Image (tube, rainbow, N blue to C red):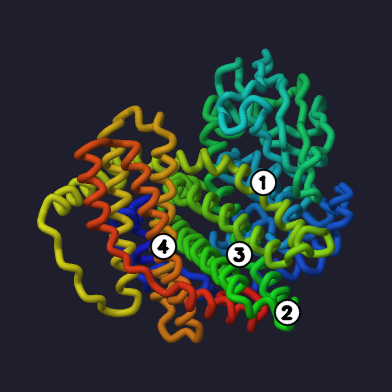
Amino acid sequence: MPTSETAQLRGGAWLVEPSDAHEVLTPETLTDEQRLIGATTQQFVDQEVLPALDRLEQHDWSVARRLIARCGELGLLGVDVPESYGGLNLDKVTSLLVSERMASAASFGATFGGQTNLTLLPLLLFGTESQKRKYIPRLLTGELIGAYCLSETGSGSDALGAKTRASSQPDGSFLLNGEKMWITNGGFADIFIVFAKIGGEQFTAFVVERAFGGVTSGKEEHKMGLHGSSTTAVIFQDVRVPAQNVLGEAGKGHKVAFNVLNFGRFKLGGMCCGGARAAIGEAAKYAAARKQFGQPIAAFGAIRHKLGEMIVRTYAVESLLYRMAGMIDARIESTPHEADDGSASLAVLEEYAIEASIAKVAGSEVLDYVLDENIQIHGGNGFVRDYPAERHYRDARVNRIFEGTNEINRLLIPGMLARRAIKGDVAIISAAKALQDELLGPPELPSAGVGPLSDERRAVDAFKKIALMVFGLAMQTYGQKLSDQQEVLLHIADIVSDVFSAERAVLRALSQGDHPRAALHVDAAQVFVNDAAMRIDAAARQALAAITRGDTLRTMLAALRRLMKVVPIDTVTLRRRLADEAVARGGYIFA
C-alpha cells in the first residue's frame, strides 16, 4: 500500500498541501486478501442474512444472536481486534470493506455495528487489561452481545448534558440510575457501554452487565426503518457497578464517547457507500428490464441522467473513504506504539476527526440521493414492498441522525479546522495570508493545461483557495464568536467537503493509468468537479454575503470570480456513458 504521502499528511492538511495521485490508496489497489474478506462478507449477507430478514423484522432476536455468532466464526467481528484477544488485527481498509458489504442488509448492519464499532472498540481503546481479557473474547464469538448507551431524551447531540447518575458507594462501587434512549441492540444485549455522571458532575463511561441486576429494556421502538434491528430504551435502576468497571478515567467519558464516534462516522460512511453501490445495481437492472413506449427505460435520457449522477456521487464518496482508510493505516504504521494497547489507533482517530465527519455527512447524503432516485426509477414498484427499493429508502434515513446529526457534524468540520489553525497543526493561517497577497497582486494568466485532468486539477486548487478565503474572512470577522454563526459554518463545511471529495475523485482517476476503465474514471471525476464548482460558488457567495457588506463584499466577490474560472463541460454525454456502462454491466461500474 502506498504510504509516503499519506503517512505525513495530518488531518485537515490536504486543504493547504498538495497530494500525489500515485501515493494514495484507491479501491483498485486492494490486495487479494482484502478482496477475499470483502467477498466472504458479501456471501454471508446474501446467503445467510437476507433470507433471515423476515424473522429479524418480526423481532426474533435469537436469529440476530445466531447471525452475530456466525460473524464471529467467519472472523468478521475481530477485524480491528489484536490477535492476543482472539481477533485478526487487520487494517482499516479491510474494516471498511466489511462495513460496505454489510450494507445490503442495513438492519443487521446496525446490529453488527453495535457489536463491533460501539462495544468492542471502546473496550479495545480504553479498557484495562483485565476488562479486555474478560469481555473481548466473548464479544468476538458472539457469546456476549453489546450495546452503547449515550443518548437520552434530553441529550442527543448534547451528549455531555446526560442526566444518568452514578453515585459513589463506600466500597468503591457505583449505583447507576437513569434511562438511555434509542439504544441499538437494547432489547437483547448482555453488556452495555454506559455514560453517566459521577456525583452529577464527572461524565464517565462504565461497562455494565445486564447480569448485575436492575437493568431493564423498554419496548421496541416503532421506527421508520431498520425494522430488523432492536432499538429500545434501557433503564438503569440502582445498578451496582464495581469500581473496576469504570471504562477509561473517571470524568473523562467524553474521550471515550467522541473517539468512538469518530471511528463510527468513518465506518458509517463506508456502509452508506456500500448501500449506494448496491442500489445502483438494482436501478440499472430494473431500468434495463422495464419497458415503456416499446423500449427499456434505460434508453431514455432522463433515466440515464439519474443513473449517471448516482454513479458520479458514489464514486466521489468511495474515493474519499479509501483515501481516508489509507491515511489511517499509514499513520498507525508510522506511530510508535505497543502492539495491543490501542494508543496508535486512538491518536489516529483523533487526528482524522475532520475527515470522519466529512465521510459521515457525504456518505449518508449521497446514499439518500441514490436511494431516492432508485425509487423514482422503479416508479410505482419502488413505493411498494414487492421490491427492496422501498426498504432501502426507509432504512437509510436514520444515517443522517446516527453518530451525531449531519448538522452537528457540519458544525464540527470548520470548528475543528479553526482549532487546528490556531494551534498551528494545519498551516491555514499562513496559507490564507499568502492567498491574500496573491489576490492583492496582478492576476496571473491561466496556464495551458498539461496532462490528463489538468483543468480539474486547477479547479481543485481554486476550490482550496476559495475555502481558505471564506474561512479566513469568517475567522477574522467573528474571532472567538465564530461558533455562534452556524449558518456561515454550514456553508464553509459544505465547501470544505466538496474540496475533499473533488480532490479524491481526481486523484483516483489520475492513478488509473492504463486500467481498462480509466476513461470512465475520468468521466466521473470531470462531472463531479464540474458540479462541485457550481455548489462551491453558490455556497461561497451566500457565506460572503452573510459575513460582510458594501465595498468589502464587492471586493470578495471579485476575488471569488477571479479564482473560480471553471469552464462548464458537456456533462450530458459523460453521464450517458457512465449510465450505459452500468446498464451493460448490470451494476456499479467501478466495483
The residue that mark 1 highlights is 398
Q: Nearer the viewer, residue 391 or 50?
A: 391
Q: Which mark is residue 293?
A: 2
Q: Are marks 3 and 4 in contact (CB under 8 Å)?
A: no
Report if residue 591 is visible in the image. Answer: no
Q: Are marks 2 and 4 in contact (CB under 8 Å)?
A: no
The residue that mark 4 highlights is 502
Q: What amino acid is labelled 1 in the image?
A: Val
Work out how far the residue at label 3 is from the one at label 4, CA to CA, in angstroms. 22 Å
Under tag 3, what secondary structure? helix
Q: What amino acid is labelled 4 in the image?
A: Ala
Work out how far the residue at label 1 is from the one at label 3, CA to CA, in angstroms. 21 Å
Classify residue 486 by image quadrant.
top left
Work out how far the residue at label 2 is from the one at label 4, CA to CA, in angstroms. 38 Å
Disc 4 packing (10 Å; few <14; some 14–19; many ≥20): many
Numbered disc total: 4
Q: Which mark is residue 97?
A: 3
